[in-house]
Image: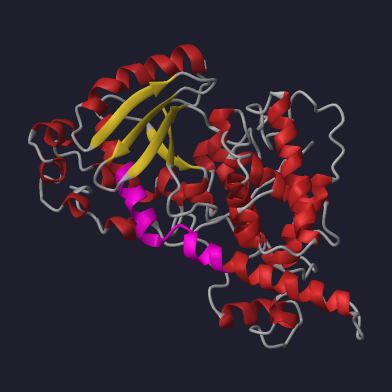
Amino acid sequence: MRGNHQSAGPGRNSASYHSNQGNRDGVSNYHGNVAGVSRYHGNKGGGNRYYGNRGGVSGYHGNGGFVSRYHGNRGGRISLPNSDQDKRSFLQQLGSSANPTSSSSFHGNRAASNPTQAETAAAAYADFNSNRIWQLFVEKRQTDATYAKKLLLRDTLQSIVSPTFQSAGIFIVGSSLNGFGTNSTDLDLCLMLTSQELHQKREAAAVLTMMLKPLRQCRFLNSVQLIHAKVPIIKFRDTVSQLDCDLNINNPIGIYNTHLMAAYAKCDWRVRPLVMFVKLWAQSLGVQDASQGRLSSYSLALMTVQYLQAGCSPPVLYSLQSLYPQVFDYNRPYTEIDMRVQLPWEELRSQNCQNLGQLFSGFVQYYSEFDWRGFSVSIYIEEPFSLTNAARSVHRDEVFAQIQRAFRVTAQSLRNQRSLSDILNNPV
């Protein structure tokens, strides 16, 4: 199966979060004192020893450097319909002048002028589900305050590694930046040491091992541990921001994928809430957890985007890699990636007016009927750039059967018009 596309986008320049315009001690605004680190860490050593007077933030983001450009303005916080006025504007762009608070305008297509009782009931059910999906998105999406904490923690870590790796850059990757993050999303980071590829199990793991000691000496970090995997990571928790973090070394595919997903999220306001609800649904039915051999959050996002491209008529999304190969090019230096890139969004706007409830039902139906022949041992979801299997964690027959069953059972529940709350809380 191919699910080779993605979504999200930018907002306010990261320097505005740091409030460090020209301030040499970039960390002090976060830590609350001139030395910056000692008060935050609660000791003299852990902070000043690593930070000194380097002031990691201003030097890191200064002069329009590539890391600042990548993280963009508002770093992944996309302007999407947050109010009736925003929804009205969106509908007007589609050629609709109807009241956005009414189900027939905000929630899209209405079939016949004289619908049957069954059609009326189905439309009302889809409208109700659409409102619920949107409500959950508004409640759970990552806030500006949470993203600001992530930026500031990223810069603090940058200051820690700078004395050893002076030319390195730490990038936020994944849901925290591409627009699909919730307020409880972990912070995924990529430390780029070189433009050359590193052997992950040997070279990258060796570098991470070197980093364990200085990270463990930071009193604001807890549970620092090295996880050996295909892409090894250091896991830790920041006790100040209460953020759980994963740090990898020289895995640029995450940077390219984050950029692509960010762009897909900007194409249509429905993409973010739909992806977020699909993840919530998968968690509730026990089919999302890569560490347990199930689908990863990223795989579910790819599956959703693939459905929005191939399973809808007309499609909600088009292939950005096909339309703009120069922009989304894996051979392009990662230092040139700009999350603020502007595409002709009006030209990319879909004529599909289905609401979120209809799209979720379509997503479930699409994969409940999907031809999985040849995938009985593992699910293959193609990475958009490396062309490797994004769902490589799914390799056991019993897990694959559980995923298939989740789609079939949910499809039947939606046909029976069970409430979304009931589907999430009491899966059959």
Give the x, y percent position of residue 45.
10, 31
Give the x, y percent position of residue 252.
53, 32
Magenta span: 135-154
Q: Quadrant of residue 109?
A: bottom right
Q: Residue at x 23, y 54 (%)?
A: 22
Give the x, y percent position of residue 60.
32, 43
Q: Quadrant of residue 382?
A: top right
Answer with left or right where residue 361 lies relative to residue 263. right
Secondary structure mostly taken by the magenta-highlighted segment of the chain: helix
Which one is nearer the viewer's eye here, 123 or 299?
123
Q: How many numbered marks, from 0 up?
A: 0
Q: Residue at x 64, y 46 (%)?
A: 301
Q: Tell me if residue 349 can be seen.
A: no
Position of 215 relative to 179 (above/below): above
Which one is nearer the viewer's eye here, 337 or 106?
106
Answer with left or right where residue 159 lies relative to residue 330. left
Is residue 139 in the magenta section? yes
Is residue 223 in the magenta section? no
